[in-house]
Amino acid sequence: MRIGSGNSDEFEINVIPLIDVMLTLLMFFVLTTTFVQQGHMKVSLPQASDAASAPAKDTLVLVIDKEGHFFVANNRVLGDDEATLKRAIEAVAGSDRDQPVLLRADGMTPHQAVVTAMDALGQLGFTHLSIATAPPAGPSRS
């Protein structure tokens, strides 16, 4: 009597349930991922050109010097933190959050100071932000 010699069943792994689980996980991650970036501030990207435009009379001007110090309406903000900057902006702007804001930052300003100013404006509810630029120093291309 031969034991086990008549059965030549080969061991096989069924991968169909594994594929089902992987496709379900893939659909879950695709559907829960947000591809649209929500923005609270509308930013007018600067365009360097030869024609300079003067800001409107009701524009709030926020200046950042190359050391990262803030100036709101030509008044130095005492302190470089976001809370102090927000208080200074609120004092000048009042409750008008629809007025345009012009951000003038020195070319050597630390990036963090510009981000702090933009974050403070966004938290206060300002939606119209323009960033001032200078025309290129070289000869104009026509």
Image (cartoon, rainbow, N blue to C red):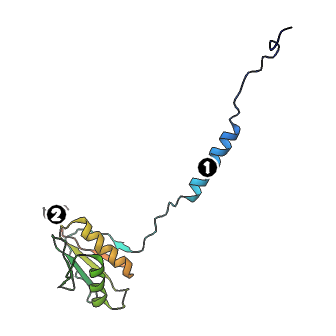
Q: Tell us which disc is closer to us: 1 or 2.
A: 1
Image coordinates for residue 17, horizontal then vertical, percent: 70, 40
Nearest the viewer among 41 and 79 is 79
Distance of label 1 from label 2 (alpha carbons): 55 Å
Give the quarter of the figure containing the N terminus.
top right
- Residue at the farthest top position: 1
Quadrant of residue 71 within the rendered picture: bottom left
Q: Is residue 83 left or right of residue 109?
A: right
Of residues 18 and 93, the one nearer the viewer is: 18
Q: SS for tag 2?
A: loop
Location of residue 133 with respect to 53 vertically, above or below: above
Q: Amino acid at mark 2?
A: Ser
Quadrant, the C terminus: bottom left
6 left or right of 41 in image: right
- The residue located at (37%, 82%) in the rendering is 124
Element class at badge 1: helix
Task: Specify few, some or many for label 2: CA neighbours under 10 Å numbering under 14, 14-19, or 20 or more.
Answer: few
Q: Which mark is residue 97?
A: none
Look at 26% across and 70% down and name the residue there: 114
Percent across and percent down for residue 59 are 28, 85
Residue at the image point whose x is 71% and y is 33% from the top: 14
Residue carrying label 1: 25
Residue 49 seen in the current view: yes
Q: Position of residue 10 (x, y in %)?
A: 74, 21
Of the image marks 1 and 2, the number of the one nearer the N terminus: 1
Q: Residue at x 66, y 40 (%)?
A: 18
Figure quadrant of residue 111: bottom left
- Packing grade of label 1 (10 A; few <14, some 14-19, many >=20) is few
Does 123 sit above or below residue 136?
below
Residue on which the image places disc 2: 140
